[in-house]
Amino acid sequence: APLGGNSVWSVAGSPLTLGYGGESDNANDNEDGGENDANNNNRPVILLATSIDSTSMFHDLSPGANNAASNTLTLLLAAQLVGSSVKDDVLDSLYGQIVFGFFQGESYGYMGSRRFLKDVLEGFQCTEGNEGVPSVYKKKDEANTQRGCLHPLRADLTFQNLGQVRGMIAVDQVANLGGSKNLYVHGGAATDGESGYAGFLSEVIVELSANDEGGYVAQASSVQDQEDDDGVSPLPPTPLSSLVQLSSSAVGGVVLTGYDDAFVANSLYHSHLDSASSKYQTIDKDAIASAATLIARTAIAAAYQDANNEVDSETASNYASQLIPEPVSSSSATFTTLYKCLFEDGNCETFLSYGTVERTNDAARTGSDLGMGVPLGTPPSYYTSIYDSSNGQAFLRASGKYYGSLMPDEAGKDSEPIKNYGVDDEDVFLVRPSLLEMSIFGLLNNYLGKGSLAEQSEDGSDPALTTCKSTKDCSSVSYCNSESSSSTTPTCAGGSCVCGTRSHYHPALDEALTAAANVGTGMFELGEEDEGISALYTEPYWSNYVGVRVYNDAGNTPGVYASSLGAVFALACIGFVWRFKKTMVKEKVY
């Protein structure tokens, strides 16, 4: 089976509308990024991106402390800082739109970021029409019903309403700085053909770090001005590589890292020893907090830049610092909770709580309970997993049958005609993400869903949030501001009712693969136009029909007893042979 999973992306500010965005097949066709409409669609996108997976020689031991764990924690904290500091109406007034992207499968050919950016940059084409179909058919007449595509299957087409990607701010390995307080900015002007925007992002990060409360300083990497044999500036292994390659260097960005021209000593990149509990690894919590603050403030400054790049880095940095005056603290409750979940116990109570809410919400929305996603484990392991219906592959149910994708005009494998989607009101798109992906989904909704709260108290403070177990518990909530967007319908995230759904899943699968039409899940077709950018990663996937016998782990005791008895028996045999030989010699028969 191929490797894969689900990436998670979310918008800061008012949620995007879930309906079809307009006449253009791709919002990125609009050179000016589109007008800032009432539903936050088609504004130039500043993508904050990172990887959420890791690997090692032993796939079930991929702790990724200085890789996946620190990357995910940094970007989640940045999202929390933006969501708690800046109201939606302010974010919506900025020229650019901030989008958070947590990409799965980056350790294997950048599967998550390449699939997402290829769909966004090049314009995804749905065979049944780009407007798609209601992902839950029985809710086809409800406003803002999420749309899906039958073939190639996409369970959520909301990404079509994103504007032109203007630049990216990525993060990588900021937990181990090699004992220093130096962060490094890679990329910059060399990534977008000196158009000015990526260089502006680099200048902003350096400018903002000058006022870092913890003494951490960001400086330009020494490799920014270098080029490889193809004339391309070398970049860290992040989603920015996907953006630069797919856009042919028309769009670029920066990467904030904890290393300069080489990984720091004992970075343990993609090693089973890259664990917070390992004596070989050093995790700097304050460095993570500082990086999260820099990322959040840089995102605001990036969105503040106008269409003609006329805002200088100092002005933009000052504006961002005023909107976000308080930095992330490594001693805060949010930091402590997320650190425990991502570095120590992937099955922590927080993740289980968010996962349970998302499972309940999805079951209520689709009418099918697919159960909890595959756990992250204790200690966490960030291997991306195989890609099937139990491990992240989206699929659909049409007339009681399940398909990896659907083309109604063709016959199925049993030569029977395929009924069209929508013949049965119970037709629906389904997906079972991992617990990590579900938790990130819910956390982003929680962190970014408080900017639309209507101020109710005289002192201007936000109202107390209503507790919930699922979105249906939020039906009576009245504190969401519906004036800023028609998509701020209250939703339950992590036990609290927040305003609107901002999070979305996107398949993380090699771009050469497409789910085979009119057959069950786990079957894929290789595209004829595959450019072979990366290797096609797969794993052996043994069916349960092969026959596997599983034994209980009885611990070390039986082995100790068996070894001891074997040693005693061996000694007894040696003694018997020695005595028998001695007797035979005495009797002169030997």
Image: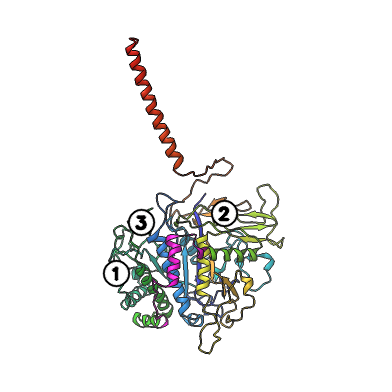
Up/down of 550 relative to 372, above or below: above
Residue ID for mark 2: 390
Report if residue 82 lies within the magenta region: no
Question: Mark 3 and mark 2: span between their CA atoms?
Answer: 32 Å
Quadrant housing residue 452: bottom right
Q: Give the range drawn in magenta.
A: 322-351
Give the crowd class for mark 3: few <14, some 14-19, many >=20 residues within 10 Å.
few
Say which amino acid is labelled 1.
Lys
Numbered-mark total:
3
Question: Upstream in the sequence, badge 3 or badge 1?
Answer: 1
Question: Mark 1 and mark 2: span between their CA atoms?
Answer: 43 Å
Give the crowd class for mark 2: few <14, some 14-19, many >=20 residues within 10 Å.
some
Residue ID for mark 1: 181
Q: Nearer the viewer, residue 237 or 310?
A: 237
Residue 588: x %, y % from top left: 33, 9
Residue ID for mark 3: 278
Question: Mark 3 and mark 1: span between their CA atoms?
Answer: 21 Å
